[in-house]
Image (tube, rainbow, N blue to C red):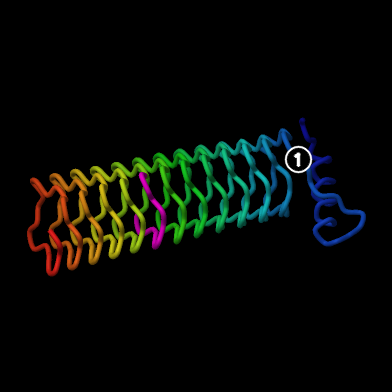
Amino acid sequence: MKITEDELKDILLAHEQWLNGDPNGIRAHLSGASLRGANLTGANLADANLTGAGLSSADLSGANLTGANLHGAGLIGADLSGANLTGANLTGAGLIGANLANANLTSANLTGANLINADLTGAELDHADLSRANLTGANLHGAGLIGANLSRANLINADLTGAELIGAGLIRASLQNARLSDAHIARANLIGAGLADADLSRADLSGADLARANLIGANLNGANLTGANLTRANLLDTNLTHANLCSANLNGANLTGANLTDADFTNAKR
């Protein structure tokens, strides 16, 4: 369904009235609508129905999409920088190469979303559901992911430098070659996660659960692993120079070839 510019203006006006409780207002129903390249800068589409809408290359920068339903929407290359997507439904959405820098995605549902090479720099994703999402090569530098669910997510080659992942769920997530230096990952669940060749230098992994995680060749130089659970983790050829492993559980962990120079194992279980 192709929407003309004039039709879109009328729909947005009626939706604004609906949001304000005007009896003449009508909620925006744009399910399956073709809005490729549309200019929706700053538009108020809170609680709008955009399921399966075609929004590739659309400009939604600064838009209000709080609680909007974007299930299966096509947002390839769309500009959502600074947009408010709090609580939005983006399950299965196509966001390849989308710009979500500084967007607010708190508690949003991005289960199974395709975010390959998306820009999420500084985005707020606290308590968002990103389980099974594809974030290969995505830029999450400085993003907030406190309590987020990233179980089985694909984060290969992703940039999570300085990201806030405190208490996040990363069970069996793929993080090979990911950049996590200076990230805050305290108390995160990384059971069975793939972290081969990942850069975790100076990362805070205190209290994190890394049982059975694959850390082959990972860089943990200066990382804080105080109280971390590394039971049966594979640390083959891992760089643990200056790492803090005080009170960590290393029962059954493989440390073959690991660089343990100046690492602190005080009260660690081995």
Q: Residue furthest right?
A: 24
Who's the residue at 61% across and 57% down the image? 86
Q: Residue furthest top?
A: 1
- Between 217 and 207, the one lying in front of the other is 207
The amino acid beneath tag 1 is: Leu
Q: Is residue 170 magenta?
A: yes
Who's the residue at 44% across and 61% down the image? 146
Image quarter of the C terminus: bottom left
- Between 27 and 43, the one lying in front of the other is 27
In the rendered structure, the answer to whether residue 111 lies left or right of residue 60 reads left
In the rendered structure, the answer to whether residue 186 lies left or right of residue 49 reads left
Determine which quarter of the picture holds residue 42: bottom right
Determine which quarter of the picture holds residue 153: top left
- The residue under label 1 is 30
| Spot occupied by residue 261 in the image (x, y as percentages of width and height) | 7, 59
| Spot occupied by residue 137 in the image (x, y as percentages of width and height) | 39, 41
Q: Residues within 10 Å of mark 1 (few under 14, many from 20)?
A: many
- Between 139 and 27, the one lying in front of the other is 27
Q: Is residue 12 magenta?
A: no
In the rendered structure, the answer to whether residue 178 lies left or right of residue 44 reads left
Q: Tag count in the figure?
A: 1
Residue 184 visible? The answer is no
The magenta segment is: 161-172
| Spot occupied by residue 266 in the image (x, y as percentages of width and height) | 12, 69
Residue 5 visible? The answer is yes
Who's the residue at 16% across and 50% down the image? 253
Image quarter of the N terminus: top right
Q: Magenta region, mostly helix, strand or loop?
A: loop
| Spot occupied by residue 25 in the image (x, y as percentages of width and height) | 87, 53
Q: Is residue 134 above or below residue 239?
A: above
